[in-house]
Image (spheres, rainbow, N blue to C red):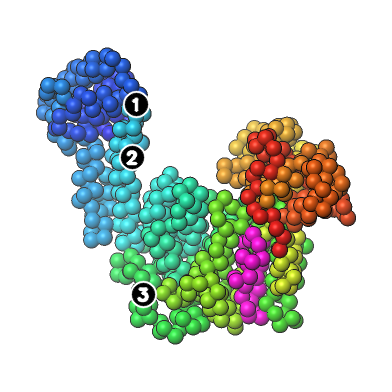
């Protein structure tokens, strides 16, 4: 006879499973199994079975369940296994050999495993232990706090075993297996920092630096958005090891097994590659493969990473080398992966090439890729960076400045620390102030041919400390704002992105869905482009809807999108979509500007001038003109000609929805609304 807690509550004898009855009876058994060979008071059972006030006959109900359990166990031959359910006054005792409980066997197997000392023995032990799980612990019990807490405790023990199994495979050099094991657990527990840190190291050791760094930044955003905290020591430590290893330029670790885990995405990036849209970008990611992140660039005899050294002797570099040019290691390659299904933008890519490869000025060239939310600014910049990476042999740096996100924007000191670590600066030599760190950064890269990509900037002031000073360095900045300040003081050259036309939009749909599906109904494809305002992000979200519904024709989705009440919801895919992107833009507006945008959304056709805008908002002409200028700078309205403004349909729909939720315009703006 065997008792199962690690999944659905069950009792099996041989190949047969005993019938345990309703949830409360299973819950009584579960509570007795969680405290085997221990008396469990009746009051504890009652408190656990009823989340609210228990009924007057609760004692009778529990007694009835115990009586039925006793009979069920007897029918299954419990006596032969030394199992007895007895009453002791107002308490119950389930006496049995504890090895009959799967949770007990699980604990014993995990305790025997020593992943660092004896990894070869630990792997089968831990695999056997985890094989005892058949779903979420305590499935089938009542949903009361005591059972939720008990299930959580068991799940914590399972995750600890998963982490240990990953470490054991890592010690054996089986990094592909470690990554595959840790990946599924990380997806389901995205805030467990130790798990993510282990996955990052495993991914890096298989040569997937980009995926490893994307996991760090995704987890950092989640911690900030859901808990309001920064990454802890374990997660930050793994991230810094990877950056230092990239700079150290040590030899690359190779999987001992020689076999990749099934499927390229089985242990890859958390959310796939960046698309040709303007969704929330990944702050730092590597495209090239680097050495094992052990602080020395080497792998010990077991294939595991050694503890990172804190001095030049440990890292194999002198103080002067590490704190000076930083060229003792490999050039940092921190670009995200190239955007998937990137199409068109030839003119914009050519404009970037003209701006960033112009060596005639003797200055460090600077380009600002600006445009509305969802137009594909990040994708365009990253695509160009990959195409021209060979022009920058000393490295490519990338950072998400988080200018338009739910959390706080990235502080320059934070980004400079990442850059300096990637360039080989020891952590203890990174200056604490942004001003000193900026000076060190400029001195390190002064003679390099280096590309810097600064994504999702909010303001010129945020960007300036991050600009390199060497004439052979180039910088690309992306922003929803025009960043006129950079144009004025740093001679930045703007490269504007416009929405897609019918032909380009249909081509993007074809790339996402397959050209045959689009060719079935070209008129519907053109309508979808119109309904999506030609925004790549919206078109990709529409393609995601159609991919999830393979029987739908394009015309059916177009018909659904014509309903303005549903359009924004349909143009969303999980955590990305036009509504989410616009919300981040509007959140940066002042209350006055948010109210003005809300008023503009009531325009019948989206075309208006300053006089009409003033009438709609109830503002005086000067206040209205200033507000329109700021909205145009943020690409929330477009100034087609002098005193001729347009607001896109999707922006109108979003602003109307926000107005309806708040009861009046302008309640969602939090920025200061000032221009640079």
Task: Please provide percent x and percent y for residue 244.
Answer: 44, 71
**Alpha-carbon distance for marks 2 and 3?**
38 Å
Q: Which residues are magenta?
A: 453-478
x 71%, y 82%: residue: 362
Q: Which residue is mark 1?
A: 51
Q: Which residue is mark 3?
A: 310
Residue 88 seen from this side: yes
Foreground residue among 217 and 525: 217
Foreground residue among 436 and 81: 436
**Quadrant where the image shows the N terminus:** top left
Q: Are marks 2 and 3 in contact (CB under 8 Å)?
A: no
Q: Residues within 10 Å of mark 2 (few under 14, many from 20)?
A: some
**Alpha-carbon distance for marks 3 and 1?**
53 Å
Residue 275 seen from this side: no
Q: Residues within 10 Å of mark 3 (few under 14, many from 20)?
A: few
Foreground residue among 666 and 646: 666
Q: Which residue is mark 2?
A: 152
In terms of image quadrants, where is residue 240? bottom left
**Which badge, 2 or 3, is on the more N-terminal residue?**
2
Secondary structure at badge 1 equals loop
Task: Please provide percent x and percent y for residue 97.
Answer: 14, 34
């Amino acid at each position: 006879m065997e008792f199962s807690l690690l999944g659905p509550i069950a009792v099996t004898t041989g190949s047969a499973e005993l019938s345990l009855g309703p949830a409360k009876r299973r819950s009584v058994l579960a509570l007795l199994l969680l405290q085997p060979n221990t008396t469990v008071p009746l009051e504890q059972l009652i408190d656990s079975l009823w989340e609210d006030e228990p009924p007057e006959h609760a004692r009778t109900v529990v007694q009835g369940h115990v009586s039925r359990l006793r009979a069920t166990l007897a029918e299954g031959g419990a006596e032969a296994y030394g199992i007895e359910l007895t009453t002791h006054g107002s308490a119950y005792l389930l006496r049995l050999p504890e090895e009959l409980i799967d949770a007990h066997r699980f604990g014993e197997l995990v305790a025997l495993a020593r992943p660092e000392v004896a990894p070869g023995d630990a792997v089968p032990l831990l695999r056997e232990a985890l094989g005892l799980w058949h779903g979420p612990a305590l499935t089938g019990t009542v949903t009361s706090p005591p059972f939720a807490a008990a299930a959580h405790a068991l799940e914590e023990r399972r995750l600890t075993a998963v982490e240990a199994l990953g470490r054991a495979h890592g010690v054996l050099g089986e990094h592909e297996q470690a990554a595959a094991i840790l990946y599924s657990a990380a997806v389901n527990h995205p805030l467990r920092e130790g798990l993510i840190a282990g996955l990052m190291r495993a991914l890096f050791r298989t040569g997937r630096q980009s995926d490893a760094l994307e996991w760090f930044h995704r987890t950092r955003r989640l911690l900030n958005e859901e808990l309001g905290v920064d990454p802890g020591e374990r997660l930050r430590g793994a991230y810094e090891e990877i950056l230092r290893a990239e700079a150290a330029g040590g030899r690359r670790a190779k999987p001992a097994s020689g076999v990749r885990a099934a499927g390229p995405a089985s242990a890859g990036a958390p959310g796939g590659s960046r698309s040709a849209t303007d969704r929330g970008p990944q702050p730092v990611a590597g495209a090239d493969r680097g050495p094992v992140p052990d602080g020395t660039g080497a792998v010990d005899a077991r294939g595991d990473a050694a503890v990172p050294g804190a001095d030049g002797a440990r890292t194999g570099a002198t103080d002067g080398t590490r704190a000076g040019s930083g060229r003792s290691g490999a050039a940092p390659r921190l670009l995200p992966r190239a955007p998937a299904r990137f199409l068109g933008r030839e003119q914009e890519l050519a404009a970037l090439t003209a701006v960033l490869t112009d060596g005639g000025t003797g200055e460090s060239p600077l380009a600002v890729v600006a445009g509305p939310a969802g137009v594909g600014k990040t994708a365009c910049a990253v695509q160009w960076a990959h195409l021209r990476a060979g022009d920058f042999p000393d490295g490519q740096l990338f950072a998400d400045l988080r200018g338009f996100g739910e959390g706080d924007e990235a502080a320059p000191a934070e980004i400079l620390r990442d850059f300096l670590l990637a360039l080989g600066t020891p952590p203890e030599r990174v200056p604490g102030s942004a001003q000193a760190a900026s000076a060190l950064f400029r001195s390190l890269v002064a003679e390099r041919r280096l590309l810097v990509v600064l994504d999702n900037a909010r303001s010129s002031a945020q960007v300036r400390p991050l600009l390199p000073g060497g004439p052979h360095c180039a910088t690309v900045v992306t922003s929803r704002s025009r960043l006129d300040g950079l144009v004025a003081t740093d001679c930045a050259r703007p490269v504007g992105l416009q929405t897609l036309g019918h032909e380009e939009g249909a081509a993007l749909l074809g790339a996402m869905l397959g050209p045959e599906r689009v060719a079935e109904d070209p008129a519907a494809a053109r309508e979808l482009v119109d309904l999506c305002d030609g925004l790549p992000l919206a078109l990709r979200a529409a393609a995601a809807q159609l991919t999830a519904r393979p029987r739908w024709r394009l015309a059916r989705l177009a018909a659904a999108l014509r309903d303005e009440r549903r359009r924004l919801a349909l143009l969303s895919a999980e955590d990305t979509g036009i509504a989410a992107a616009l919300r981040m833009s509007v959140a940066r507006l002042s209350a006055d500007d948010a109210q003005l945008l809300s008023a503009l959304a009531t325009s019948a056709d989206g075309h208006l001038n300053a006089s009409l805008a003033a009438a709609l908002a109830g503002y005086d002409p000067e206040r209205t003109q200033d507000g329109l200028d700021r909205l145009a700078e943020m690409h929330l309205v477009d100034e087609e000609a002098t005193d001729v403004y347009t607001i896109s349909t999707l922006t109108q729909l979003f602003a109307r929805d926000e107005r309806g939720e708040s009861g009046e315009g302008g309640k969602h703006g939090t920025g200061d609304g000032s221009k640079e």
